[in-house]
Image: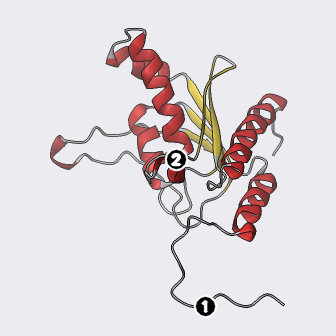
């Protein structure tokens, strides 16, 4: 698969956001949201910093846009229209929570680095990008399908994860069993 120079340049910016997360001792995931060839929002994991498990990179970027668009007086339908013209570039496959939010918002497409074998919502565990889920009692808006392309700069994304886990997570809960001794 040939990846376009534009896709690679946006993924580089997502990798930069992931490095910022790593520098802040966060799980190194970063993203950018693009509209008409321009980055309109960036995000990085901030779960430790905010002490809020929902503050994934994608949610951070989405909140930036929602805030801007609401401040500009956009209606809900205008916001939905704007999201339908946006692409997300993220270093790791969106988790189930983020993939569901992206589906509900109606994002056009997602490009990601490495797969997320534990929590992936774009094919690894669930395929929320390609299955319209039926709302429960019509309380939850049903999602829209979005195009998903993975494996872009995956080795760079994996290297950031490896660096994070090798340095140890000082914010992780204390293990229940002793760690293997380093020799």
Mark earlier in primary sequence (2, 1): 2
Q: Is residue 179 left or right of residue 155?
A: left
Q: Is residue 170 left or right of residue 151?
A: left
> Does residue 130 appear anywhere in the picture?
no
The picture places residue 141, in percent across and down from the top left corner, at 28, 37
Q: Secondary structure at mark 1?
A: loop
- Residue 41 x/y as whole percent: 59, 26
CA separation, marks 2 and 1?
A: 30 Å
Q: Secondary structure at mark 2?
A: loop
Residue that carries the numbered disc 2 in the rendered image? 56
The spot of residue 102 in percent (x, y) is 46, 39
Q: Is residue 33 above or below residue 148?
A: above
Q: Is residue 49 left or right of residue 51?
A: right
Q: On screen, 123 above or below 118? A: above
Q: Nearer the viewer, residue 17 or 88?
A: 17
- Residue 65 visible in the picture: yes
Q: Give neighbour class at mark 1: few <14, some 14-19, many 20+ (Cα, 10 Å).
A: few
The circle drawn on residue 52 is none
Instruction: Please give the count of numbered marks on the rendered protein.
Output: 2
State whether residue 114 is above or below residue 4: below
**Residue at coordinates 74% horizontally, 43% vertically from top-left?**
15
Instruction: Give the residue at x 81% y 39%.
Output: 3
Residue identifier under label 1: 178
Residue drawn where x is 54% and y is 46% of the image: 46
């Amino acid at each position: 698969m040939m990846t376009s120079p534009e896709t690679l340049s946006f993924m580089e910016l997502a990798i930069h956001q992931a490095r910022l997360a790593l520098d802040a001792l966060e799980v190194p995931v970063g993203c950018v949201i693009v509209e008409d060839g321009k980055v309109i929002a960036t995000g990085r994991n901030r779960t430790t910093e905010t002490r809020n498990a929902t503050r994934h990179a994608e949610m951070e970027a989405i909140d930036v846009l929602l805030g801007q668009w609401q401040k500009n007086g956009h209606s809900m339908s205008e916001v939905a229209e704007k999201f339908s013209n946006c692409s997300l570039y993220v270093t790791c496959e969106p988790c189930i929570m983020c993939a569901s939010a992206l589906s509900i918002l109606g994002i056009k497409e997602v490009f990601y680095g490495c797969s997320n074998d534990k929590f992936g919502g774009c094919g690894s565990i669930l395929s929320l990008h390609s299955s319209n889920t039926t709302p429960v009692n019509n309380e939850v808006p049903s999602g829209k399908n979005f195009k998903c392309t993975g494996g872009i700069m995956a080795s760079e994304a994996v290297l950031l994860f490896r660096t994070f886990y090798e340095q140890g997570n000082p914010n992780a809960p204390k293990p229940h069993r002793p760690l293997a001794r380093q020799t």
